[in-house]
Amino acid sequence: MTTTTSRDDGPTASPPPLSHAVDWASVPSDILACVCKLLSAVPGRVCFRAVCRSWRAVADDLTHDQRAAVARMPPPWVVIPLESGCCEQFTLASVPTMQSFRWTPPGGAGMRCVGSSGGWIAGAYIGGDRKIRLSLLNPLTDARVDVPATLGRVWYMPKSKDSTREEIVLCSAVQKVAFSPSPTEKNFAVAVLTYPRKGNGDVIVFTRSGCSGWCALADPGPFERGGDYIRAQLDVAYHRGKFYYMSMSNTVWVVDMAVRYPKPEPLATFQPAIPRGLLYGRHHLAVTGDGAVHVVSSSIHCLSSSGVDMLVQRYDPTSRAEQGSPWVKATCLGGE
Amino acid sequence: MEVDKGKGEAEETRKVAEADRDTVTLKSSDGKLFEVSKEAAARLSTVLAGMIAGGSIDDNGTDLKQIGSEALENVVDYCNKHANSIPSAALISSSISFNTAPFKEPEEWERKFVDRLSHDALFDLVEAANFLGMERLLDVTCHKISEMMKGKSPDQIREVFNIKNDYTKEELEEIRQELAWAFYDD
């Protein structure tokens, strides 16, 4: 019926060409509001609101119209699995606003959340080949980076209903995980505190894009076997291109991942070492916003005492000359 | 439309002839003519319905100065396809929980219709649909735009739509604070 020739109704073989002639920021606000309403509360409208000023104004107007139309999800978030073991759905809740949304990790298979960093979640799962695998996932964009290196193998069928067993296996395989921000298939670095497998005493290992296996970080020193003991004494953290980790002899090591052949270097040894016979003792590594490395130590000397001794030490190389130790007892971490 | 009394009779004859036709002729900003089913145009566009009812349709091509020929061709194409399509039981979307007004999912042919458009053509079509008060076409195009945003970070959305990040450093920091999950870059 048109005066021009009719077009083919079939789907086009190639995607429509990208063009940059029109100004999408100038789209009338009622149209943008219509688009925004069609997006999911999280992450759709959250991302929409962050694009530019005019879009934010549209999203905020919607909020006035419809209560909670744009979810406010400021960090920190709590990741709540919906069942034990590996699960296919999580509830992500923002602590400050208590708003939440249901998240299904992309890729289908269930997983266990074993860590997080900068808005990304590390998920561990047992693959169809019974190998323990790790993926990095962004719940806002549904981006997923599969880490090619595997963390050992289980000797039973992974689809078994024994979710508790699965949980124990995965939690001991990945006791702590640290990774670079905004990972992509082509650019990521992951370090894992794992359990010493048979014939393989490596407990702190790292891999990065382009690697199919794990590289051991420096020997953490002698330790007694047992997952809990290792977890309590060792830790690994990432900050600005470097992994920091500690050995059983209370030395903090640093390895720069930007170089071609990353080589661990000792940073400093902290005191006191946790003496034997302690009921509970833990060390944690933390990097504050200003880039300073901290060691957080906690200990309980006997069960009857209710108190837990906590010590936070800040690594400050300038104090080595003055006080003989680069560790300064921290009383304030600079938070609000 | 005000009828010139001097040529009232001729005008009347012409209007009768026009009323008998089942198509209307539309003229794009660059002067191209398109014919569209009168029934579909009146049903799908509140603006065209008003013009038809008010008799302000020009037999030689009703001027639509705001709409270019490419966009108008798409509008007309959409109207005529709509006139020919057999309406199916449209599904009310269940996935949009926060929506107040029920939105009918685009039908298969409507999806195909917008999928083949370039970004420019889609943009022009949205504006044309808005101008002509074509609610259904707006829904379909907005749905397509929202699909293009799904699963993308703010950075990626800006890239797709060629939008300049006009936030100041301070505002960006504020957004970063609020949305560390979407923005984090160490």
Image: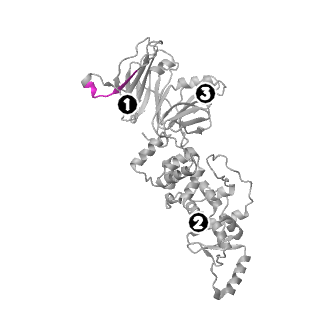
**Disc number at residue A333?**
1
Viewer-nearest of discs 3 and 1: 1
| In this view, B2 is above or below A302 | below
Q: Taking B28 as reference, is B111 above or below it?
A: above
* Disc 3 from disc 2: Cα separation: 55 Å
- Identify the secondary structure beneath mark 2: helix
Spot occupied by residue A96 in the image (x, y as percentages of width and height):
50, 37
Chain-order first, disc 3 or disc 1? 3
Q: How is the image coloured?
A: one colour
Comparing marks 3 and 2, which lies closer to the viewer?
A: 2
How crowded is the residue under tag 3: few (<14 C-alpha within 10 Å), some, or many (20+)? many
Magenta residues, start to end: A310-321
Amino acid type for the residue under numbered disc 3: Gly
Gap in Å between the C-alphas at discs 3 and 1?
Answer: 35 Å
Instruction: Give the amino acid at mark 2.
Output: Phe
Can residue A123 be seen in the rendering of this structure? yes
SS at badge 1: loop
Left/right of residue A122 with respect to residue A254 in the rendered view? right
Disc 3 marks which residue?
A85
Instruction: Residue A120 in the image: state x and y as whole percent.
Output: 50, 37
Judging from the image, mark 1 belongs to the subunit labelled A
In the image, taking residue A131 as reference, residue B22 lies left or right, namely right
